[in-house]
Amino acid sequence: MNLESAPASTSLTVIPVNTPPTVDLSDPVRPQPIWEEGSDGTLIITAEDPVSDVDSEFLDYCTFTIVDGRDGELESLEVETYSPTVLSVYDSTSYTLTLQGTASVNDMNNAIESLVYMSLSQDPTGPSRTIEGICVDTDGGESSPDYVEILISPVNTPPIVDLNGNLPGYSATPVLYTEDSGEISIIDVAPNEPIITDPDSDTMDNCRVMIESVTPGESLSVPDLECHVESSYDAETGILHLDGPASIEEYEDIFRSITYSNDAQFFDNPKERSEERRVGKECRSRW
């Protein structure tokens, strides 16, 4: 005989445990984000709905940190999508953007998907930046960190030539040349005042100094140079060519030594007429 026993039972108490959020910032199918020097902010989150939570509809806060930040206050993180439930605060000392709730997972995702990297640096350091993201739910569950890498694409910034020292503008103070005066200096900038500035290069490749609307008899020259720069003057174009890699400081010393002369005899009485000559200068960096 097959006899079945009477049923017996026991009780089981299920104690729920908070499961922390999950953060996944990158979609492997989409291109890696690239920031190009001089551009606006670059969107860096390629995944859709980068944050999820199986047992919570709300998040307390999320943080995003440039873990290898190098340019101080010049670089930052921010979100472009406004949400009344998400407050964004960036701390430049720790390179950290905090998105403070309480906010729904959906609202937080909308903010995170608009996260951008920005930099005002004209000489960004390093080939990339790594951003770390962490989210915490309202029960204190903290996600494992996830990371996204941004490629940094620097752009050569051209040098600036300033011939008037610390005064406003860039043009030098006019210099008076009297007929038959021989050679005169045309740049009066103190040794402690910069003439050439370049945010991303310490070396110039060449410079040109040109007399605008040059006339026969006019010339520009420099004394014998001790550095690797060669000078040549073209009387037809009025251009003094300075060629060869040298430091900014060496080119500045050359500029201070440039002289102008004019062998032409324009008129018998120099007091009867005066003419203005403009001398333009430009430099090309070695980058």
Image (cartoon, rainbow, N blue to C red):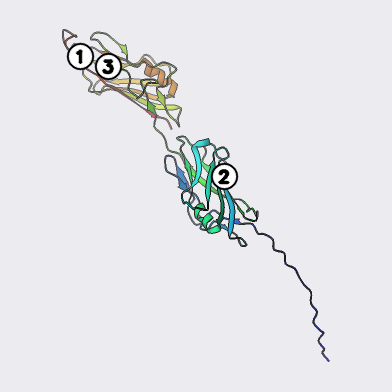
Question: Percent position (x, y) of residue 227?
Answer: 43, 19
The residue type indicated by label 1 comes to: Ser
Crowd rating for badge 2 (residues with CA inside 10 Å; few <14, some 14–19, many 20+): many
* Residue receiving disc 3: 219
Question: Percent position (x, y) of residue 270?
Answer: 19, 9
The residue type indicated by label 3 comes to: Ser
Q: Secondary structure at mark 3?
A: strand
Residue 79 vs 22, above or below: the answer is above
* Residue receiving disc 1: 274
Of callouts 1 and 2, the N-terminal one: 2
Question: Percent position (x, y) of residue 186?
Answer: 32, 15
Instruction: Report the label total.
Output: 3
In the figure, residue 231 lies in which quadrant?
A: top left
**Residue at the image position 83 percent from the left and 92 percent from the top:** 1
How far apart marks 3 and 2 lie (CA) works out to 58 Å
Of callouts 3 and 1, the N-terminal one: 3
How far apart marks 3 and 1 lie (CA) works out to 18 Å
Residues at marks 3 and 2 touching, judged by CB atoms closer than 8 Å: no
Q: Seen from this angle, which residue lies furthest bottom?
A: 1
Residue 178 vs 277, above or below: the answer is above
Q: Tell whether 116 sits left or right of 93.
A: left
The residue type indicated by label 2 comes to: Thr
Q: Secondary structure at mark 1?
A: loop
Crowd rating for badge 3 (residues with CA inside 10 Å; few <14, some 14–19, many 20+): many
Closer to the camera in the image, 111 or 258? 111
How far apart marks 1 and 2 lie (CA) works out to 64 Å
Residue 71 shows in this picture: no
Q: Seen from this angle, which residue lies furthest front?
A: 84
Q: Disc 1 vs disc 2: which is toward the camera?
A: 2
Residue 77 shows in this picture: yes
- The numbered mark at residue 65 is 2
Crowd rating for badge 1 (residues with CA inside 10 Å; few <14, some 14–19, many 20+): few
